[in-house]
Amino acid sequence: MSANTSETIEQLKHAPETTGVEDLIRRRWSPRIFSDQEVSSEELTRLFEAARWAASSSNEQPWRFIVGRRGDETYKKIFDSLVEFNQMWVKTAPVLMVSIAKKTFTSNGSPNRYAMHDVGAASATLALQATADGLHIHSMGGFDQEQVRASFAIPSDYEIGAAIALGYFGNPDDLHERMRKNEVAPRERKPLEALVFSEWEKPAKL
Ligand SMILES: Cc1cc2nc3c(=O)[nH]c(=O)nc-3n(C[C@H](O)[C@H](O)[C@H](O)COP(=O)(O)O)c2cc1C
């Protein structure tokens, strides 16, 4: 695939300019093919720095991340926990992570019902920093949570979030046909009326 094709697909994947939304947000999307380019430790550090600055209930910062690079034991353990479909495409990703939420407040041990909400916020912040740096992440729910818990000895007061692949966009021609179609299709979203209400399921007049 030429650099041209890669650029064309990138453009196709961006949310429409007509939304008026910030360029960085429009450019985030989740690829299923990554290039050979490694992610430097400076880049990795910057992504987790970005995640660290997300908002959280009582500033608990309940997010934890386990991160592995291709070839290391951490990567292998995360990879092994993925369902077959995800293993098929994720093998090109140079970095694999798992997000984790601390379910209790550190100050008093009471339940933190916002823990996973805040892990989501940190992950979204990380995703936007990745986009700004020319990288992409792809989150995955298709993995065996208990396998991850056991293989990393994660305590019971922590909840496993998502597995996350990270890297630079690769060549979609290398993908299995079933996935390639999706990789070159425009992204879709529900209309605002289905999401933003003034009364339950009554679209808000914005
Ligand atoms: C929590 C979560 C779980 C996901 N699980 C999977 C998965 O197991 N496998 C997969 O290929 N994509 C998975 N995705 C990716 C979504 O399908 C993708 O984000 C969605 O189609 C929107 O596309 P976009 O991220 O390019 O905007 C997941 C995304 C999230 C946020």
Image (cartoon, rainbow, N blue to C red):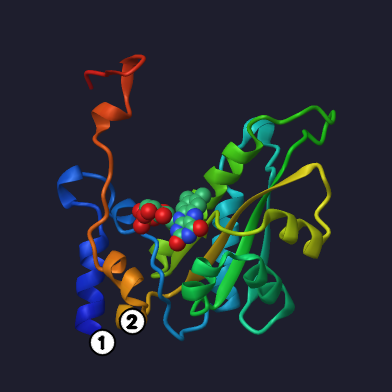
The residue drawn where x is 63% and y is 71% is: 79
For mark 1, give the secondary structure: loop
**Residue 151 or residue 51, whichever sits in front:** 151
**Residue 55 or residue 198, whichever sits in front:** 198
Q: Is residue 194 left or right of residue 68?
A: left
What quarter of the picture does the C terminus occupy?
Answer: top left
The residue drawn where x is 38% and y is 67% is: 31
Circles 2 and 1 in contact, beta carbons < 8 Å: yes
Reading the chain from its start, which is encountered first: label 2 or label 1? 1
Q: In the rendered image, which quarter is residue 153 located in? A: bottom right
The residue drawn where x is 61% and y is 81% is: 70
User: How many numbered tags mark residues here?
Assistant: 2
Which residue is identified by label 2?
171
The answer to whether any part of residue 20 appears in the image is yes
**Residue 91 place in picture, x, y as percent:** 52, 78
Which residue is identified by label 1?
1
**Residue 82 or residue 189, whichever sits in front:** 82
Quadrant containing ligand 1 reads bottom left
For mark 2, give the secondary structure: loop
